[in-house]
């Protein structure tokens, strides 16, 4: 399979503080990969490292097989990586429809259109003209995912998508993410909770103190590892 995103011996952090230590991981086209780990181990810093928010001090980040220097949010989206940030970042003064349209600003062609987003998330059609921040937490997560899909990414990166959602909404989210993946979009799901990823991801990395402590097939992740490294 072709390599989509890879970190090779990456050391990254903020100012002089090193958060990621010699981090190695790889996602191929169409894969569904989870990065698991407790609070503060550096999961979001992985995202920040390829968005140019964290400082890369050593190592290499490769996007679609090419080493990238300091990329920014827009460059990543143009290259086919869309991020659903932790906390969703719905733009307060924009309606649901306007938030979605914003996602298409990178002008990447593909199968995702506002109509297709509305088909997958009918509630977004019903509430298209209300402010995005007036939606419930679960609906805002759908909006954030829809907005990211509007950029027609090869890889959708989700940072703690199940945070603050009721179990029934997490079930719905898992179904939707599987549908996205079935359409050929790769998924990188960053989570400290196992309930979503065990239904969506096929492979996992466990991060501990900024390093990969374990990796393997999702089906082979043991209860002992879960207890040791994340919330169950
Ligand atoms: N912008 C920043 N500037 C300075 N330090 C930061 C910044 N963002 C994160 N950190 C620090 O980096 C470390 C790792 O944070 P990170 O957000 O990557 O962890 P995480 O595993 O995603 O945790 P969480 O589940 O809480 O989001 C923490 O000690 C945090 O305080």
Image (cartoon, rainbow, N blue to C red):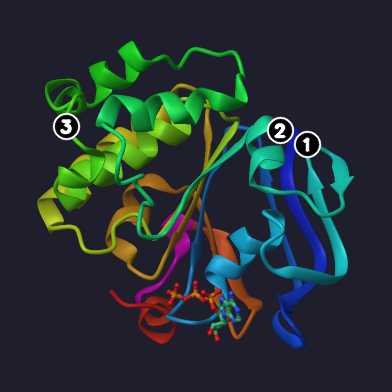
What residue does disc 1 label? 64
Q: Quadrant of ligand 1?
A: bottom right
**Residue in the picture at 34% in, 27% down:** 98
Q: Quadrant of residue 8?
A: bottom right
Inspect the magenta stretch and tell me whether residue 12 lies in it: no
Q: Quadrant of the C terminus?
A: bottom left
Main secondary structure found in the magenta portion = helix
Q: Which residue is mark 2?
A: 79
Q: Is residue 123 visible?
A: yes
- The residue beneath circle 3 is 130
Lower sequence index among marks 1 and 2: 1
Secondary element at tag 3: loop
Secondary structure under tag 1 reads loop
Q: Position of residue 180 (x, y in %)?
A: 40, 29
* Mark 3 or mark 1, earlier in chain: 1
In space, the residues marked 3 and 2 are separated at their CA atoms by 31 Å
- Marks 2 and 1: in contact by CB < 8 Å? yes
User: Which residues are the magenta region?
Assistant: 218-223
Q: CA distance from mark 3 to mark 1?
A: 37 Å
Q: Classify mark 2 as within 8 Å of ligand 1 or not, answering yes or no.
A: no
Which quadrant of the view contains residue 120?
top left
- Circle 2 packing at 10 Å, graded few (<14), some (14-19), many (20+), is some
């Amino acid at each position: 399979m072709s390599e989509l995103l890879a970190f090779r011996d990456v050391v990254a952090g903020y100012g002089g503080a090193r958060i990621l230590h010699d981090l190695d991981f790889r996602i191929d086209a169409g894969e569904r990969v989870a990065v698991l780990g407790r609070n503060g181990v550096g999961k979001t810093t992985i995202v920040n490292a390829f968005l140019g928010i964290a400082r890369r001090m050593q190592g290499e980040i490769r996007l679609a097989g090419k080493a990238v220097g300091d990329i920014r949010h827009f460059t990543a989206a143009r290259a086919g990586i869309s991020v659903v940030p932790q906390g969703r970042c719905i733009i307060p003064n924009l309606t649901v429809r306007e938030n979605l349209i914003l996602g298409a600003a990178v002008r990447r062609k593909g199968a995702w259109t506002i109509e297709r987003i509305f088909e997958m998330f009918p509630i977004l059609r019903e509430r298209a003209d209300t402010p995005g921040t007036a939606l419930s937490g679960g609906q805002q997560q759908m909006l954030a995912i829809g907005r990211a899909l509007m950029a027609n990414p090869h890889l959708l990166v989700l940072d703690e998508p199940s945070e603050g959602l009721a179990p029934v909404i997490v079930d719905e989210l898992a179904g939707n993410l599987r549908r996205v993946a079935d359409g050929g979009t790769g998924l990188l799901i960053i989570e400290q909770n196992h309930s979503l990823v065990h239904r969506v991801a096929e492979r996992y990395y466990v991060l501990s103190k900024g390093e990969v402590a374990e990796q393997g097939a999702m089906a082979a992740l043991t209860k002992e590892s879960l207890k040791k490294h994340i919330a169950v």
